[in-house]
Structures are given as structure tokens and as C-alpha cells.
Image (cartoon, grey):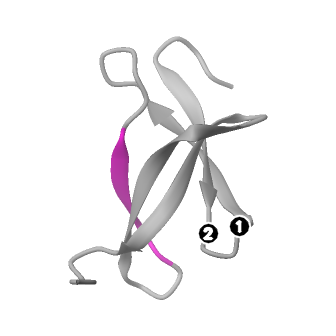
Amino acid sequence: MSDDSTYTASFIGDDGAETSTEELTLIDGLPQKSLVRPGSQGDDVNWELDTDSTADTGFVYRSTGVAQHDYS
């Protein structure tokens, strides 16, 4: 359950399905803009806050790719 210092984050995978939810700590009263979490294949995955979407449970994060990979 969220209190004044935490919020619920929903993580949405590349296929559009929710992969998990997690309680995160607010920073100066705001949700984190981006973060890195372990992926299912052992690589760390970058996640970015989707400011245009919210879930019933709270804020939505979308995968932006594997950390430390150059996608250019």
C-alpha cells in the first residue's frame, strides 16, 4: 500500500502487457523519471516514465531497451 513517500509503478513490456508492479520511493514528491531494473534474460533494462499514461494502480513505465546498448 502506498504512503506519502512511495507510489506504485506498473512496468509495461514491449508487447504492451504489464510485466510487474513495484512500490517505488518518490523523489522530492515526484515519481522517478527513469530507472534500471534487472531483465528476465539477465541484462539490465532501462525503463522510462510514460507521462501520457497512468494505470489503475499508479504510474506507468515503458522499456526503452537494454542498459549499456547503443541502439543508434
Q: Residue furthest top?
A: 4
Residue 10 x/y as whole percent: 63, 48
- Residue at left offset 69%, top offset 25%: 1
Indicate the amino acid at tag 1.
Gly
Report whether 16 appears left or right of 48: right
Q: Is the residue 4 above or below the residue 34 in the image? A: above
Instruction: Give residue 2's quadrant in the image.
Output: top right
Answer left or right for 1 relative to 64: right
* Residue extending furthest toward the bottom: 41
Query: Could you say where residue 15 lies in the image, as x and y percent from the top left?
Result: 69, 75
Relative to 66, residue 17 above or below? above
Name the residue located 53 percent from the left edge and 81 percent from the top edge. Answer: 40
Looking at the magenta stretch, what is its main secondary structure?
Answer: strand
The crowd level at tag 1 (other Cα within 10 Å; few <14, some 14-19, many 20+) is few
Where residue 46 sits, quadrant-wise, is bottom left
- Reading the image, the residue beneath label 2 is 13
Could you say which disc has been placed on residue 16 in the image?
A: 1
Q: Residue at x 30, y 16 (%)?
A: 28
**SS class, disc 2:** loop
**Does residue 54 sit above or below 36 in this rendering?**
above
**Spot occupied by residue 51 in the image (x, y as percentages of width and height):** 51, 37
Distance, label 1 to label 2, CA atoms, is 5 Å
Q: Which residues are magenta?
A: 33-39
Identified by mark 2, the residue type is Gly
Q: Is residue 58 magenta?
A: no
* Towards the viewer: 42 or 67: 67
Q: From the image, which quarter does the C terminus lie in? A: bottom left
